[in-house]
Each structure stands twice: as C-alpha cells, then as structure tokens.
Image (cartoon, rainbow, N blue to C red):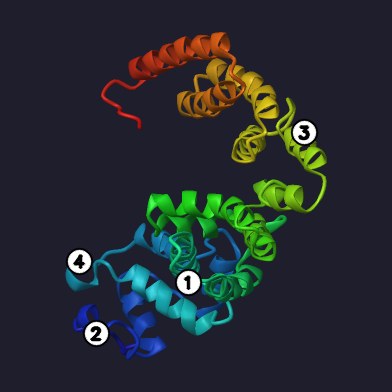
C-alpha cells in the first residue's frame, strides 16, 4: 500500500485522509490493521480507541510528527469502522455538559429542562456503549471519567440527592438509573434517595444497610456507607461503618480507613456520642501515623 499520510496531519487532523492512507502509515511503522482485526480488538479487551492505541504503541517505531499517531488513528478508524459504537470521549463530553446543566441549576441559573435535555443523549449512549454484566464495560466508563476533572465524579455522585432535595423526583430517578447503568456496583443504592422519598424510608434504609453487611463485597459495603451518610441515616451508617473500619485497618488499606473515619465522624457527631467520637479521633490519628510511615513523603488530603 503506497497510500500514506503526510506530515501535515499533525496540524490538519485525520479527517481528510483516506482509511487506506491511515492503514498504510500504521503498517509502515509496524502496526498491521484491517477492519476485521480492529473489530476483534474492540470486541475483546480493548473496548475503546485509547485501549487499542496503547496496544499499538508497544511496537510503534515512529518518531517526529508520527510518534503520536496511534491514538488519533485509532479514533479515526473507530469512527469509520464502528460508527454505531460510542467512544469514552463522547461519554466524557456528554457528562461535562450534563454536569454544567446541573451546576447551573444548583446556582439558580439553570432549569430542570436543561438537565433533562442533557440526560437524553447520555441515556442513549449508555445503551449503545460496550456492556459487561449488568451495565457498561467498566474500562469504558473509567476512561471517560479520566478525561474529566476529579470533582466531576463527586458532582455526578451527589446529583441524585440534590435533585431529591429540590423535589424533582422524575429527574432524580433518571439520573440514578444512568448512574446504576454506568456503575453497576451501585445497583439499588444510587436510587435509594428517590425510593425513600417516594415510598417507605425505613424500608429503603434497611435495604441499603443490608448491602453494607459483613460478607458483602468491600466496594459494595463502602457504597452502602456513603449512601447512608448522604441520606443522613446515622445509626445505620454507624452500624455499617464500624465493622468496615476494622476490616480496612486490618488490611492496612489506609485510604479506605481514612474515608470511613470521615463518614463515621459525621455519624457520631450527629448521634452526639462524644466518647465514641473522641475514641475515633485517636484511632484516626493512629491510622494517619501508620499511613505516613508506610508512605513517607506521601501527602493525602
């Protein structure tokens, strides 16, 4: 294949070049690819352009303007050969506009309609994205959120509760459903604030607490604790948090332990159990010191 890309691609992008030219240039620098093998990668363990590009980079020979070709090439071929499949970049872009709409609404400048409008394309995208188990392929979602600022994940997590507080329950339910599709570990938990507002709060809290019981996966227990804290179900948050803190401390998982201390401190303060709170403070100081010894020079916030 003599057909190749010229150096101007770095300024112009790849839109104007033929698929054959992109393939020819990849082949010249050591990556043989055709539609069938590309699709096989996308169906297998490289469910995004970035994942495919990092595969290619292992044997990539080019320097100069062609050194960084693999990612743009993977993105271009993806949009030509798999146009029906969204990319993590599209999810990141949609998520950014959804969070902007939510932020504006919280500041009293935006409307619920704008949030609903930003939700619709993401709901569609989530059904078309690569699936795994009960939701979207985790690597796909991780890659999308990696393109957003860290605060984006927190804003996304807190939005259902914020909408419930504003009594916008239909919107809150759509948001929670999207969250549970993107993060299947949160099934039944993301929607708990909506369910509690619509139905029997005590029953919903008991269900969330059950997800945090011993014997459940650690991540699930932590999500249960987060949800209980968010819903200000303090006695249950304490009951889930205390045994979970023991587990985290035993396994020297300092970051998890410190995060649990934070939720527990909020619970004990709300329950006005001052002796337990001061014991927790001492324990947190011990964990902090052990953390510092294990990772000298490592600052956590």
Looking at the picture, tell me which residue is in the foreground, 176 or 30.
176
Which of the marked residues, 4 or 1, is nearer the chain's N terminus? 4
Label 1 crowding class (10 Å Cα cut-off): few <14, some 14-19, many 20+? some
Q: Quadrant of residue 62?
A: bottom left
- SS at mark 3 in the image: helix
| Res 73 seen here | yes
Q: Which residue is mark 1?
A: 90
Is 2 situated above or below 186? Answer: below
Q: Residue under label 3, please give it.
A: 210
* Residue holding disc 2: 12
- Can you tell which of label 1 and label 2 is closer to the viewer? 1
On the question of residue 187 being in view, the answer is no
Q: CA distance from mark 2 to mark 3?
A: 55 Å
Disc number lying in front (4 or 3): 3
Q: Quadrant of the C terminus?
A: top left
C-alpha span from label 3 to label 1: 36 Å
Residue under label 4: 63
Tell which circle, 1 or 2, labels the residue nearer the N-terminal end.
2
Residue beneath the point at 48% across and 77% down: 78
């Amino acid at each position: 294949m003599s057909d190749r890309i010229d150096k101007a691609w770095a300024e112009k992008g790849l839109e104007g070049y033929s698929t054959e030219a992109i393939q020819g240039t990849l082949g010249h620098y050591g990556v043989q690819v055709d539609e069938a093998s590309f699709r096989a990668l996308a169906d297998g363990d490289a469910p995004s352009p970035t994942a495919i590009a990092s595969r290619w980079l292992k044997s990539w020979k080019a320097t100069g303007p062609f050194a960084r070709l693999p990612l743009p090439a993977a993105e271009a071929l993806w949009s030509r050969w798999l146009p029906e499949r969204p990319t993590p970049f599209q999810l990141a872009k949609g998520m950014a506009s959804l969070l902007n709409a939510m932020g504006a609404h919280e500041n009293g400048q935006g409307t619920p309609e704008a949030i609903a409008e930003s939700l619709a394309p993401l709901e569609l995208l989530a059904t078309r994205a690569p699936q795994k188990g009960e939701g979207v392929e985790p690597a796909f979602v991780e890659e999308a959120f990696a393109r957003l600022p860290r605060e984006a994940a927190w804003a996304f997590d807190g939005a259902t509760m914020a909408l419930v507080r504003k009594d916008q329950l239909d919107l809150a339910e759509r948001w929670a459903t999207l969250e549970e599709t993107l993060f299947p570990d949160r099934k039944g938990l993301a929607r708990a604030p909506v369910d509690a507002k619509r139905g029997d709060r005590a029953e919903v809290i008991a269900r969330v607490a059950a997800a945090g019981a011993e014997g459940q996966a650690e991540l699930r227990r932590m999500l249960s604790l987060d949800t209980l804290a968010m819903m200000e179900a303090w006695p249950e948050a304490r009951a889930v948090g205390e045994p979970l803190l023991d587990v985290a401390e035993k396994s020297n998982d300092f970051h998890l332990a410190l995060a649990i201390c934070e939720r527990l401190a909020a619970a004990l303060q709300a329950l006005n159990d001052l002796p337990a709170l001061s014991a927790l403070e001492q324990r947190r100081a011990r964990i902090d010191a052990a953390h510092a010894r294990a990772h000298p020079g490592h600052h956590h916030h």
